[in-house]
Structure formats: C-alpha cells, structure tokens
Image (spheres, grey):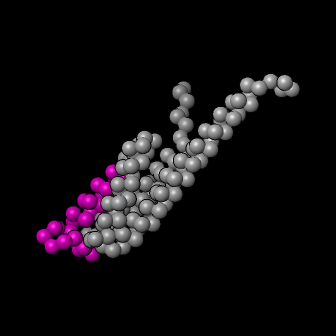
Amino acid sequence: MTERRRRGAAESLASIVLGFESVIVFLGGLVLFGLRALPAGIEPWWGIVVGSVLAVLMVLTAGVVRHTWGIALGWFWQLLLVLGGLLEPTLAVVGLIFGLMYAYATIKGASLDRLNAQRRIDAERAADQPNGD
C-alpha cells in the first residue's frame, strides 16, 4: 500500500473553500435563472448552465490547488464571481465573502505550511544531536 501524499494547510483550506463555494455558485445560477437576471437576448436557462459549469470548474480546481497555478486559478474564479455582481448584486456580496475566506485559506495556510516545514527541520536537527554532547 502506498503512502498518501501529505497535504499542506493551504491546499486543504483552499480546497474546502472552493468545494463549499461550488455549491453556492450552482445555487447562484439557479437564482439568475429564477430572477431572469441575464441581459436581454440571453435565455434565462443560461444562468443554470453557467452556474453548473462554474461549480464543476471550482470542484476541479479544488483538486489542483497543490500547484501554484491551481491557487491562481482559484483566485480567478473568485474574481469572476465578484464580476457576476454586474448581473445580480448579491453575487458580488457572495463573491467578496468567499474571496475573503479564500484569501485567509491561502495566506494563513501558506504561513502554517512554512511553520510546519521549519518545525520538521528543527526536529530532524535535534534528532541528529546526541544527548549530553
């Protein structure tokens, strides 16, 4: 049996935020449909399509946040959701709230990852030192 890859705090927290956000984004698509908030000439059902596609993309992004580009892609989805406020102002509020949570997850998570890496290095150094010498 192979050992599982160790996930850092930034990866774990960012993927949790994106996972929960994907549900809200899907529901936001339903809101766009129900309120017929899309511009004239665009069928309301496109709200459901866009919400569903964006939700799936967020879930897929949650799987690649271990990479720097995955974190950046998550930021892009945050920006896109805030821009959705042009269609429905509530989406901007939701985007800002989740954007703040994503910021905390990525910034604080990276800080915790650096701290944990330093603790591992310190523990390895301490293990190499013989007692009493």
Residue 121 belongs to magenta span: no
Instruction: Kindly give the residue lying farthest to the front in the view shown.
Output: 133
Q: Is residue 80 above or below residue 4?
A: below
Q: Residue at x 19, y 71 (%)?
A: 39
The stretch of residues the image draws in magenta is: 34-58
Q: Residue at x 70, y 34 (%)?
A: 123
Q: Residue at x 42, y 66 (%)?
A: 96
Residue 17 coordinates in the image, percent (x, y)? 47, 56
For the C terminus, the image quarter is top right
Q: How many marks?
A: 0
Residue 68 coordinates in the image, percent (x, y)? 42, 43
Q: Nearer the viewer, residue 26 or 88?
A: 88
For the N terminus, the image quarter is top right
Q: Residue at x 31, y 56 (%)?
A: 54
**Residue 26 visible from this viewpoint:** no
In which quadrant of the rendered view does residue 97 lie?
A: bottom left
In which quadrant of the rendered view does residue 92 lie?
A: bottom left
Q: Nearer the viewer, residue 133 or 29?
A: 133
Instruction: Kindly give the residue lying farthest to the right in the view shown.
Output: 132
Query: Is 62 positioned to the left or the right of 41 in the image?
Result: right
Q: Is residue 89 above or below residue 123?
A: below
**Residue 45 visible from this viewpoint:** yes
Q: Main secondary structure of the magenta part?
A: helix
Query: Is 100 positioned to the left or the right of 117 in the image?
Result: left
Residue 37 belongs to magenta span: yes
Residue 114 coordinates in the image, percent (x, y)? 58, 43
Residue 56 coordinates in the image, percent (x, y)? 34, 52
